[in-house]
Amino acid sequence: MGNVHIVSTLKNKELQKKAVHHSSSTVFFAVHNPDNGIDTEVSLLNHFLLKRGISDVVATIEIRELSGNLICSFKESFDKERVYSWKLSKFIKSKFIGSISVYFNSNENLAVPFCAVTSAIVSPNSVCGIHTYGRRLEQKELGSNLDMSETTETGWTARDNSSVKSFAILHGGKFELNLKLKIEISNHNNQKLVINKNIYLAPFGTFLVVPQNLSDYVVEHLNDKKGYIKVYISGLSGVFPRMLCGNFLTNSNNSSEIINAEEIQFTHTNFDFSSIEQPDAEGNFGYFNQPSIPQGYGIVYPVETKKIISIDKKNYQSNSLHHIEINEMSQVDIVAQKENLPSRFVAATIGRWKNAQIESECSTGTFIEDYLKVPCHWHWGLLKPSLDNGEGIISIVVGKFNRNEDISRTLKLRLFDNKKLIIEKNIFIDEHKKISTANLLSKNLLNSAIWYVLSGDKLEDLNIFSTFYPENKAGFVEHAF
């Protein structure tokens, strides 16, 4: 992986402030089944106009089968201060598995090739959402350090048993790809099951990886305990290879396909920093922050490290899955002894939902002091998709670090639906704060996707999340942009 160059969190944020991009893209897994109510919705707040004053953005939205075959394509102009959303069932009436891509173009600088878009999938007993994870590379990025030929992806939790299957999604770009995959599944005893698979990915194709469909030994190997999965991929070109990864629950009819799932939960993978070098953070101290989440806990994904790192005063064992006991709206200290923390020490917040069999999982990482060094005036994200009724809760966790100054301030909260700005109010904070929006929204707004914005003079020390609590289903949490 010699062509991969990973910059620090601080450097990455600084580069984003100076970058010039007139195009950007995102791609999401898409699934629809009218027989059991599975549907997919992609949405975004028009941050181009609201945050940057850019009014000429035009997007091309493409719906494609797994094979890459184009089913539907249309354009959308972003000229209003509102939420834009596209529900798969509006365009596809039969059962479908594939992808939804969004390609943005503007005469003005969009600043980042990753634009702030989310996708959500509803199933009979769950709603789960995720921010942009994979994309094609823009023309100016081809041949750059980001145009990697191989990667090792981790952060995929295996919960396989007789009714639950792990799955992951890999999206292609405009080139044909002949890929070699090595799927390494580690169980609770750190024993490894290896699955090798060669795949051909047509231009703009999507590959659905289901380990149980590739090996008869996955369930036996895990033995009703959680494991974790690494995916080694070679033969890449023209894509940012972040994957969607998670688990789905098969239904009572013994159907083993995700299109008939009863529950679907997912997050995204990360680079395996055991094999990809990254710079250190500029300090030795950070936090794991826990938002509003039912019966929650945290995990740190396995990574090989020689650093001595304590998490809530318990040492992290290299290359192990570390469990964090933590209450909602709180944080635990993560400290590196004698040296600085890695720039990225990847963790996740886990939720256990009533009457659900699969936990929700959101890859969040470690909140380090480097964030305080890049001014931030905006955080925003999806409060609720239109796929189900329910309550959205915003969690604000303050990174105080060792500062003694007054950290109290007033933020402006705005909520937008598919038509306009619907709520604007001031929020005072001087510590962690949970904002329930149920009393702010009238019932006639529940059928719309709703996004939130928190803005003010100083937001760089805030770790902000939103949690969607659907009615009688498992929900999800996602961090802000």
Image: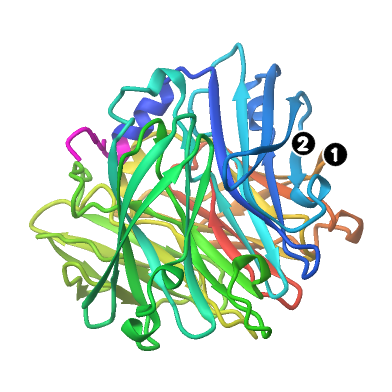
Which residue sits at x=27%, y=82%?
Answer: 188
Which residues are drawn in magenta?
Answer: 1-10
Q: Where is residue 256 in the image (x, y as percent from the top left)?
A: 58, 75
Query: Magenta stretch containing residue 248, yes or no?
Result: no
Q: Nearer the viewer, residue 422 or 74?
A: 74
110 in relation to 415, above or below? above
Q: Where is residue 433 in the image (x, y as percent from the top left)?
A: 57, 61
- Residue type at mark 2 is Arg
- Residue type at mark 1 is Lys
Q: Which of 20 and 331 is in front in this view?
A: 20
Q: Quadrant of the N terminus?
A: top left
Category of crowding for the residue at label 1, using alpha-carbon neighbours closer than 10 angstroms: few (below 14), some (14–19), many (at least 20): few
Q: Is 408 left or right of 82, judged from the image as shown?
A: left
Residue carrying label 1: 419
User: Which secondary structure, mark 2?
Assistant: loop
Alpha carbon separation for disc pair 1 and 2: 6 Å
Q: Are marks 1 and 2 in contact (CB under 8 Å)?
A: yes
Which residue sits at x=40%, y=88%?
Answer: 224
User: Which secondary structure, mark 1?
Assistant: loop
Task: Farthest residue to the top: give it.
Answer: 107
Query: Magenta stretch containing residue 2, yes or no?
Result: yes
- The mark that comes first in sequence, 1 or 2, is 2
Q: Which of 439 and 426 is in front in this view?
A: 439
Q: Position of residue 393 (x, y in %)?
A: 65, 62
Coloration of the structure image: rainbow
